[in-house]
């Protein structure tokens, strides 16, 4: 857990930052520093990346143990997880989607991927096996091709940083693609969305359509890749602060 203790007696919500696939909590470093500088409480729990239902249950349990209101922020697949998790707890007051999936009831990532017009992920998924742990056959998880990682996932970060990110990427279980969303929280919670116009993971077309469908307050960052929270942390921080002002 990454945490920054507030320096004021603010009643602002705790900001919970949930990372997505092929990443980890370190991607929030610039945002964490900026929010901590505002005296806010920030936590960045690990996302198991084992499937929508399992990951949502984990995040919901984590959030439920936080005293007071929570602003739930999700990047990429973390957005889909938060969409499901926030409906399972009663202390989430708002949702921020950072290049994130705003999935609808019964919708799967696999179905959204089939509709994607400007995503480059599909051809660059590389399957691997992992033990299920329950005595059954191994399950499948996906890495992003390391040679394509920089161009597809994080084109606007330096080469050396992209190389480290590709090396340390955490794979996403195949179950994450096929499990449907249930009771999407954006239908009952205020939501904000921010994404880059050069996103080639989910694709700008899909991100824009999901945000519009959810009636989320939306910010588009010109030229930013899928990791807009890394390349443009101020823009993401500003959206989070706007959301905090709205729900506090």
Image (cartoon, helix red, strand yellow):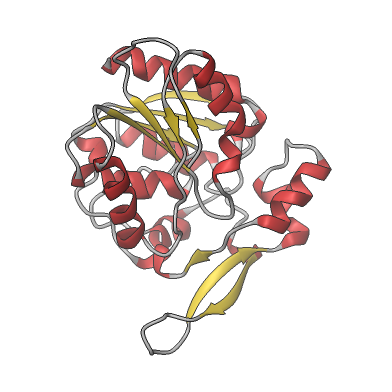
Asked if residue 193 lies left or right of residue 232, the reply is left
Q: Which of 54 and 194 is in front in this view?
A: 54
Give the percent coordinates (x, y) of residue 8. Answer: 40, 10
Q: Residue at x 43, y 18 (%)?
A: 6
Quadrant of the rendered image containing residue 91: top left
Answer above or below: position of 2 versus 54.
above
Answer above or below: position of 80 versus 70.
below
Asked if residue 218 lies left or right of residue 171, the reply is left
Give the percent coordinates (x, y) of residue 198. Answer: 64, 36
Answer above or below: position of 92 versus 180.
above
Asked if residue 226 lies left or right of residue 217, the reply is right
| Residue 31 visible (yes or no) | yes
The total of numbered circles placed on residues is 0
| Residue 197 visible (yes or no) | no
Give the percent coordinates (x, y) of residue 244. Answer: 35, 18
Quadrant of the rendered image containing residue 176: bottom left
């Amino acid at each position: 857990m990454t945490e920054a203790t507030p320096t004021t007696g603010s009643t602002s919500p705790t900001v919970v930052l949930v990372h997505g696939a092929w990443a980890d909590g370190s991607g929030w470093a610039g945002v964490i520093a900026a929010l901590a500088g505002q005296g806010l409480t920030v936590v960045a729990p690990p996302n198991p990346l084992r499937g929508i239902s399992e990951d949502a249950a984990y995040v919901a349990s984590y959030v439920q143990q936080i005293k007071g209101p929570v602003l739930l922020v999700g990047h990429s697949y973390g957005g889909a997880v938060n969409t499901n998790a926030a409906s399972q707890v009663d202390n989430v007051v708002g949702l921020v989607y950072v290049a994130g999936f705003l999935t609808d009831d019964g919708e799967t990532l696999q179905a959204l991927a089939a509709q994607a017009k400007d995503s480059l992920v599909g051809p660059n998924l590389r399957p691997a096996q992992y033990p299920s742990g329950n005595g059954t056959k191994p399950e499948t998880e996906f890495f992003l091709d390391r040679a394509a990682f920089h161009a597809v996932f994080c084109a606007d970060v330096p080469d050396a940083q992209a190389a480290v990110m590709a090396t340390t990427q955490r794979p996403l279980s195949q179950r994450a693609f096929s499990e449907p969303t249930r009771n999407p929280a954006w239908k009952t919670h205020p939501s904000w969305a921010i994404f880059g116009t050069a996103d080639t993971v989910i694709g700008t077309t899909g991100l824009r359509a999901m945000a519009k469908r959810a009636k989320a307050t939306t910010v588009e960052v010109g030229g930013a890749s899928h990791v807009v929270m890394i390349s443009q942390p101020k823009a993401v921080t500003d959206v989070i602060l706007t959301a905090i002002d709205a729900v506090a």
